[in-house]
Amino acid sequence: MSRDIDVLVLGGAGVDTIVHVPELPLPYADSYMIDPGIRTRAGQTGDFVALGVSALGLRTHHLDMLGADPEGDLVRALHRDHGIPLTEIPQPAGTKRAVNLVGPDGRRLSLYDATRAHPDDRLPEATVRALARASRHAHVSITQPCAHALPALREAGATISTDLHNWDGENTYQEEFAHAADIVFLSTTALTGAPEHTMRAVAERGRARLVVATAGAEGAYLLADDELTHIPTAPPSRPVVDSNGAGDAFAAAFLFGWLDGEPPLRCARYGAVAGAHACTVPSTEVDPMGRDELLVRVAELEAATMGAPH
């Protein structure tokens, strides 16, 4: 079977409004003067993964629901400008949107508009199957209605990854994604206790071969072949200004390595380097790391730590 798409990204298309605030949590006040201003731009989790894998040279396709609205026009323009094919399904409720409050240290608080989706939303099964049959791999965002596409993706023979983001390890909504994916990414932000417990539960209850938990400044944890490995953070090449999109960059670079046949540890190093790069990019801009820069930075990192992938 011909697979002309390396990575099919499902869901996670939308628009963010970026508001830089003097501190987080933000104390109550009647008003704040915002400098450097309030900006609205296309780019949510699925968009950033699609941008990331495409910048690394992988043939990429994005599938999601979009509204006939200005926000949808921004998403369409983002994909057009970066040469990423986009299959859009009409969303009468409108394109997904959020407001990100960004503190001086780069941390963010995201406020998602929950009115832009309905429980009966569906990606057409015939479309999902056709794209999946043409794809080596599918990365599935946990946005509605992607859970309903999981069986069709599996039946089409594509491997699957997903990012559970700030899952608490118990919410049943994320469980469906966690147990269907071959590669599972999540953040340690909302976990109570050691990440290893949740990571091993994901691997034992589902089909995941690899589980990665990102932990911000503490690095990340990789569960592969029943062995847990701590992945240190990679030093950023520029000052850290914004953590928005770091997890998506990590996932994109990890998938790049995995699809290229690299061992899991090196894939995780790819992710650490790309995630660090994302933290140096203001959230109002789009600047994913390219393949050549990633390979150079990873080689430098491995040389500096005298650690060879295994």
Image (cartoon, helix red, strand yellow):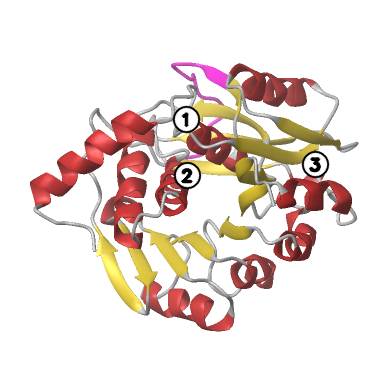
Looking at the rendered image, the quarter that the C terminus falls into is: bottom left
* Residue 55: numbered disc: 1
- The earlier-in-sequence mark between 1 and 3 is 1
| Element assignment for label 2 | helix
Nearest to the observer: residue 136 or residue 21: 136
- Residue 104 in sight in this render: no
Q: CA distance from mark 1 to mark 3?
A: 29 Å
230 drawn magenta: no
- Asked if residue 221 is positioned above or below residue 240 in the image, the reply reads below
Check disc 2: other Cα within 10 Å, few if <14, some if 14-19, many if 20+. many
Q: Which residues are magenta?
A: 25-39
The residue that mark 3 highlights is 116
Which quadrant of the figure has residue 30?
A: top right
30 drawn magenta: yes
What residue appears at the point 76 percent right and 26 percent down from the top-left corner? Answer: 72
Our reading of the magenta stretch's main secondary structure is loop
| Element assignment for label 1 | helix
Q: Is residue 90 left or right of residue 194?
A: right
Nearest to the observer: residue 267 or residue 47: 267
Q: In the image, residue 79 lies at what x, y percent?
A: 64, 25
Q: From the image, state whether disc 1 or disc 3 is nearer to you.
A: 1
Q: In the image, residue 241 lies at what x, y percent?
A: 34, 30
- The earlier-in-sequence mark between 3 and 2 is 3
- Asked if residue 149 is positioned above or below residue 115 in the image, the reply reads below
- Asked if residue 222 is positioned above or below residue 146 in the image, the reply reads below
What residue appears at the point 51 percent right and 63 percent down from the top-left corner? Answer: 183
- The earlier-in-sequence mark between 2 and 1 is 1
What residue appears at the point 80 percent right and 41 percent down from the top-left corner? Answer: 116
Q: Are marks 2 and 1 in contact (CB under 8 Å)?
A: yes
